[in-house]
Amino acid sequence: MILLRHGQSEFNLHFSATRRDPGIQDPRLTPLGHQQAEQAAEALEREGITRIIASPYTRALQTAEPLARRLGLPVLVNSLVRERYAFTCDIGSPATALRAEWPMLDLSHIEEVWWPATEEPADQVLARAALFRGETSALPDWRTTVVVAHWGFILAMTGQSVGNGTWLRVDPTEPALTEVSWKHH
């Protein structure tokens, strides 16, 4: 499968400049983030993609949109691939707000509040990544699946830190990680 980190968000823009939480809940993509999403869609449209899975955060849904549009595929929303809850940006939008903004998405399986109430311990993120790895490895088309996710989730899946709008190929049948370094690179 291909793990695609969402494009630059309003949070990423401010945090990278100040290293302080700017207090933006469920941030949207910046103009650069939209450009990164379009570039990823252009690069990935020739990969034979058959499935697009995305986190319920707005920045991930906005990143998935150009690829879904180009390929004519639905975006399957899965809260397992959400970001590790550690900053204000990790407070999501309630399911009712997401339904209003994204009426074409099936969000019937998403809880109204689908993100944790407190900071998520590293072992829980690793366990969530392992669960997703197991679920995805059972899909017949995991090799042609794109998962639009986040820095912390991708780190928990691969042990690698990736920039906004970049992606990694991952074999979900390989063993899950049991620990990673959570330091920002």
Image: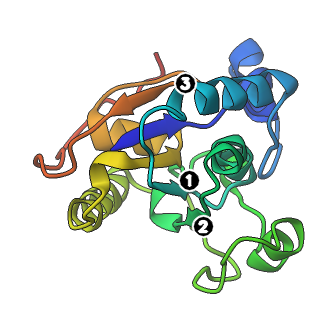
User: What's the distance in space between the residues labelled 1 and 2, CA to CA?
Assistant: 7 Å
| Picture coordinates of residue 66, whole percent (x, y) | 71, 41
Location of residue 104 by image quarter: bottom right
Q: Amino acid at mark 2?
A: Trp
If the image is split into quadrants, where does the N terminus sit? top left
Residue annotated with mark 1: 85
Total marks shown come to 3
| Picture coordinates of residue 39, whole percent (x, y) | 66, 23
Q: Residues within 10 Å of mark 1 (few under 14, many from 20)?
A: many
Position of residue 54 relative to residue 1, above or below, is: below
Residue annotated with mark 3: 43
Residue at point 77%, 52% (across, down): 26
Nearer to us in this view, 48 or 98: 48
Q: Secondary structure at mark 2?
A: loop
User: What's the distance in space between the residues labelled 3 and 2, CA to CA?
Assistant: 31 Å
Q: Are marks 3 and 2 in contact (CB under 8 Å)?
A: no
Q: Amino acid at mark 3?
A: Ala
Nearer to us in this view, 123 or 149: 149
Q: Secondary structure at mark 1?
A: loop
Q: Secondary structure at mark 3?
A: helix
Mark 3 or 2: in front is 3
Q: Amino acid at mark 1?
A: Tyr
| Picture coordinates of residue 69, whole percent (x, y) | 71, 49
| Picture coordinates of residue 121, whole percent (x, y) | 40, 55
Residue annotated with mark 2: 115
Location of residue 59 by image quarter: top right
Mark 3 or 1: in front is 3
Earlier residue among tags 3 and 1: 3
User: What's the distance in space between the residues labelled 3 and 1, CA to CA?
Assistant: 30 Å
Earlier residue among tags 3 and 2: 3
Q: Residues within 10 Å of mark 3 (few under 14, many from 20)?
A: few
Residue at point 21%, 50% (across, down): 172
